[in-house]
Amino acid sequence: MNLTFLGTGDAVGTPKVGCSCENCTFARELSIERLRTSLLVENGGRHLLIDTSPDLRRQLLSSGSPRIDAVIWTHGHYDHYSGYGEFYRIQDPPPVYAADETLSYCAPLFSFLSFEQHRLEPYVPFTLFGLSITLFPVNHPPVPSFGVRIDSPGGSVAYTGDTRADIPAPSKELLSAADLLVLDAIVPPQIHLNKHMNSDEAARLAREAGPGDYRLVHLSHLIPWSLPHIARDGECIRFP
């Protein structure tokens, strides 16, 4: 199993349009970006995409234009699903797997496409492309939001989705002991939000979960490029 971070930014990305802060200026000077967060999982030659960001076209081109075999939507915020329309005239739109609430909200927006819809029951594992996948609820008010646990013979990945730290106990159990934990960490420690974790809260959750390693994603332009454990666009992690 291989994991590629197609994007690691928040809803507006980095650099932020019209912003001249230190982090955005640094990004422009070095021609680097954080596109909107999306994860590509490859196993046995099949490609699973977790969330379809507004930057999907560029992300697919940068990753070698893989054919996407399936999509998981974590929740109904535009930066996590709106790029699905990019499949128009590119390939057969891949089947989408999501919780009932997410599909009911997002799928009608793509009525111009014909695609399979698979409604998932939280905490009930299913098998896809040789992977065991479990959707679990997190806490991102007021929208129902879900994390994803993926287990393969070579390793495991747990992804929180957009969330604050107080997620349900059964969901925290699914974050535990993963080989790689991917965490929402939108802002630096001095800022506290009702819908997301800051970087200190995410690091604390990682210590509690005890993964082999962890990466921070969904990063705003306020997160410095030197912060430990931040994921980088295009970073690939290969599992044995």
Image: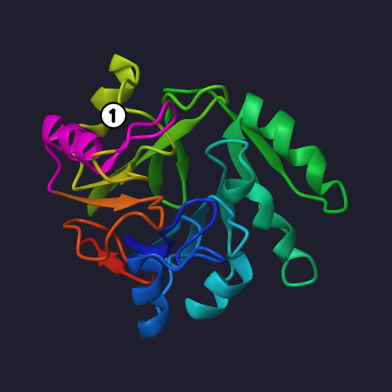
Q: Nearer the viewer, residue 21 or 212?
A: 21
Who's the residue at 47% across and 76% down the image? Answer: 63
Look at the image and tell me whether residue 64 can be seen: no
Residue 3, x across and y down, in percent: 35, 61
Who's the residue at 31% across and 20% down the image? Answer: 166
Which residue is denoted by mark 1 in the rendering?
Answer: 174
Who's the residue at 50% across and 79% down the image? Answer: 62
Who's the residue at 29% across and 60% down the image? Answer: 231
Look at the image and name its color scheme: rainbow
Residue 223, x across and y down, in percent: 31, 55
Look at the image and tell me whether residue 136 can be seen: yes
Seen as rendered, the residue at the extreme front is 20
For label 1, the SS is helix
In reply to whether residue 209 is colored magenta, the answer given is yes
The region drawn magenta spans 191-212
Q: Is residue 144 left or right of residue 100?
A: left
In reply to whether residue 225 is colored magenta, the answer given is no
The quarter of the displayed image where residue 226 is located: bottom left
Seen as rendered, the residue at the extreme right is 112
Q: Is residue 198 left or right of residue 71?
A: left
Residue 189, x across and y down, in percent: 23, 40
